[in-house]
Image (cartoon, helix red, strand yellow):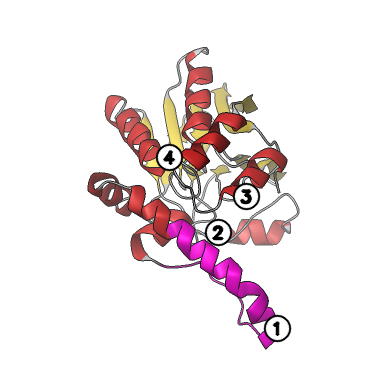
C-alpha cells in the first residue's frame, strides 16, 4: 500500500501544483490524506480549496481531507489560544501583531466562495484512520487528536507524545501543523510529519510532502521537498493586494 500525505497548504497554489505535478511522475498511490490548513495565509486560498475539492471528488475512493486550526479560525472567527498577557508593555508590543493577524484571516475568509467556506466548515475536527494489513493501524490528524493547536516536534518529550495519542491505539501517527518534517520512533509507536506544502519553515522555496509505502509489514518513508517558483508567489501577493506581503515573503524565502 502507498499512502501520500499532504499538510499545511496555506493558500499557496503554486506549491500545491508543484506537489501534484511531482506526484504524477511516480507510480500511483492507493490513498492520499490532506491533513488540514488548506487556505489561510497564502495568496490563493479559494483556489487551493477548489483544487483539493476537485481531487477529492475525482478520487473519492482514495482521498481524505481534514481541517486544521486555521480552518477553525476562518469558519468560527476563533483565534489562537495564548497565555494571559501580564503587563502593559507586552500588550503594546502585541497590538500590531494581533491587528495584522485579524486582517489576514479576514482577507483569507473573504476570498472564499460560499461552497468552499461550507466545505471547510465540514472538515473541522475530522481525523483519518486506516488499517494496513501486516503493519497495523495508521491514524492521521492535524496537530494532536482533539487539539488542533498543540505542537509536537522532534524535541517534545516521549511521554507527552504518547499521551497525546493515548486513546487512539495505533502503530503510526501522521500529522501536520508544525511545518517541519518529522520521522520519529518511540517504542512501538512511529510519528511522521510530511512538513508543509505551502509554508515550509525548514526548506524555504520548497513544497514538502510524504510518501509512505508499506511492504511486507515494513514502512518505507520518503520525505520529499519540491522546489517551486517563490518569485511568482510574491508577485501574486502584490497582484491580489495580500494584507501581509512582507511577512509572507520572509517566510517563503527564509523559513522560520
Compute the Cα span from label 4 to label 3. Answer: 16 Å
- How many residues crowd mark 3 within 10 Å: few (<14), some (14–19), many (20+)? few
Q: Label 3: which residue?
A: 246
Residue 93, position in %: x, y? 67, 75
Q: Secondary structure at mark 3?
A: helix
Q: Give me the disc on residue 196.
A: none
Image coords of residue 81 (percent x, y): 54, 71
Dot in front, 3 or 2: 3
Closer to the eye: label 3 or 1: 3
Residue under label 2, please give it. 166
Helix, strand or loop: magenta stretch = helix
Does label 3 or label 2 sit earlier along the sequence?
2
From the viewer's perspective, tell me whether residue 142 is left or right of residue 75: right
Q: What residue is rendered at 34% in x and 53% in y?
A: 110
Q: Is residue 145 magenta?
A: no
Answer with left or right where residue 240 lies relative to residue 85: left
Whether residue 2 is visible to the viewer of this picture, yes or no, is no
Q: Which residue is mark 4?
A: 44
Separation of marks 2 and 1 at Cα, in angstroms: 40 Å
Q: What whole-number distance in Å separates the C-alpha atoms at marks 3 and 1?
A: 24 Å
Magenta range is 78-105
Mark 1: give few (<14), some (14-19) or many (20+) Cα within 10 Å: few
Rendered image quadrant of residue 30: top left
Query: Residue pushed farthest right?
Result: 155
- The image position of residue 34, as x and y in percent, is 45, 38
Amino acid at each position: 500500500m502507498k499512502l501520500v500525505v499532504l499538510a499545511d497548504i496555506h493558500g499557496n497554489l503554486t506549491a500545491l501544483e508543484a506537489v501534484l505535478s511531482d506526484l504524477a511522475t511516480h507510480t500511483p498511490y492507493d490513498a492520499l490524506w490532506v491533513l488540514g490548513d488548506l487556505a489561510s495565509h497564502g495568496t490563493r486560498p479559494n483556489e487551493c480549496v477548489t483544487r483539493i475539492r476537485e481531487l477529492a471528488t475525482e478520487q473519492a475512493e482514495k482521498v481524505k481531507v481534514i481541517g486544521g486550526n486555521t480552518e477553525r479560525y476562518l469558519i468560527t472567527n476563533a483565534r489562537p489560544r495564548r497565555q494571559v498577557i501580564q503587563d502593559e508593555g507586552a500588550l503594546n508590543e502585541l497590538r500590531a501583531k494581533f491587528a495584522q493577524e485579524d486582517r489576514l484571516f479576514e482577507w483569507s475568509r473573504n476570498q472564499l466562495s460560499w461552497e468552499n467556506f461550507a466545505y471547510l466548515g465540514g472538515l473541522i475536527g475530522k481525523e483519518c484512520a486506516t488499517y494496513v494489513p501486516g503493519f497495523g493501524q495508521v491514524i492521521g490528524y492535524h496537530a494532536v487528536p482533539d487539539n488542533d493547536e498543540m505542537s509536537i516536534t522532534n524535541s517534545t518529550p516521549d511521554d507527552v507524545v504518547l499521551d497525546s495519542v493515548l486513546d487512539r491505539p495505533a502503530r503510526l501517527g501522521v500529522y501536520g501543523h508544525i511545518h517541519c518534517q518529522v520521522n520519529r520512533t518511540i517504542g512501538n509507536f512511529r510519528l511522521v510529519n510530511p512538513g508543509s506544502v505551502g509554508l515550509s519553515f525548514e526548506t524555504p522555496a520548497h513544497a514538502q510532502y510524504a510518501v509512505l509505502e508499506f511492504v511486507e509489514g515494513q514502512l518505507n518513508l520518503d520525505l520529499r521537498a519540491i522546489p517551486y517558483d517563490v518569485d511568482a508567489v510574491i508577485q501574486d501577493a502584490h497582484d491580489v493586494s495580500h494584507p501581509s506581503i512582507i511577512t509572507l515573503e520572509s517566510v517563503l524565502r527564509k523559513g522560520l
